[in-house]
Image: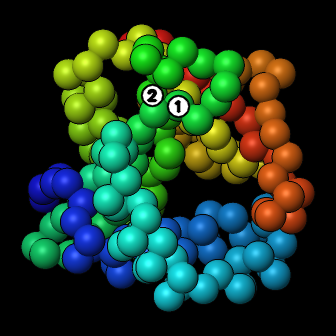
């Protein structure tokens, strides 16, 4: 089992995990029309051409015997109310749904923490769907706390509501 930097050659597998994890984790939370209409080729292109090469963003993958099992990404906070020099944002941890609840998310989070400790960030934030109890439980187990009263409606996700979590380092 290794964790390494994501490369553009990982784009297809990362997009497949991203898509499949959404379809499994968000079933019953997001409208079927959103989940059924994810365009894998657009996601591959998005990862390959935009996300992976993005500066100041750290994208990592978890690999076993050459097969990608999951990925994590973090970078500068996108929130206007945060000190961008002191706050990192966890953009996501996604695991192949066939491997949920095997500790792989914890492995990725431990690597993210290790990489963030090189810098002097005092806080990490993340956004999670309000109705995603599994993810919220995971992040709470990793030391995140609900940032009370901070939420946003995401129109392109059918009006789903996201809540913000924070973790002091």
Distance of label 1 from label 2 (alpha carbons): 5 Å
Determine contact: label 1, label 2, CB under 8 Å.
yes
Question: What is the x, y in percent for residue 112?
Answer: 30, 37
Left-right relation of 159 to 27: right
Question: What is the x, y in percent for residue 122?
Answer: 42, 11
19 lies above or below 73: below
Left-right relation of 127 to 83: right
119 lies above or below 52: above
Looking at marks 1 and 2 on the same chain, the residue that comes earlier in the sequence is marked by: 1
Q: Looking at the image, can residue 142 be seen?
A: yes
**Quadrant of image for the N terminus:** bottom left
Q: For the point 45% across and 28% down, which residue is it?
A: 88
Left-right relation of 71 to 45: left
59 lies above or below 116: below
**Quadrant of image for the C terminus:** top left
Give the residue number, with chain letter if any, for mark 1.
77
């Amino acid at each position: 089992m290794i964790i390494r930097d994501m490369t553009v050659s990982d784009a297809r597998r990362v997009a497949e995990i991203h898509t499949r994890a959404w379809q499994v984790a968000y079933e019953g939370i997001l409208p079927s029309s959103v989940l059924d209409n994810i365009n894998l080729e657009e996601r591959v292109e998005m990862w390959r051409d935009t996300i992976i090469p993005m500066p100041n963003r750290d994208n990592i993958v978890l690999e076993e015997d050459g097969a990608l099992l999951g990925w994590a990404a973090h970078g500068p906070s996108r929130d206007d109310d945060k000190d961008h020099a002191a706050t990192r944002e966890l953009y996501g941890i996604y695991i192949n749904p066939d491997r949920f609840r095997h500790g792989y998310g914890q492995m990725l989070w431990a690597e993210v923490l290790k990489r963030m400790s090189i810098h002097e960030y005092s806080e990490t934030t993340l956004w999670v769907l309000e109705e995603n109890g599994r993810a919220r439980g995971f992040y709470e187990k990793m030391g995140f706390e609900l940032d009370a009263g901070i939420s946003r409606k995401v129109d392109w996700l059918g009006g789903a509501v996201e809540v913000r979590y924070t973790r002091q380092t």
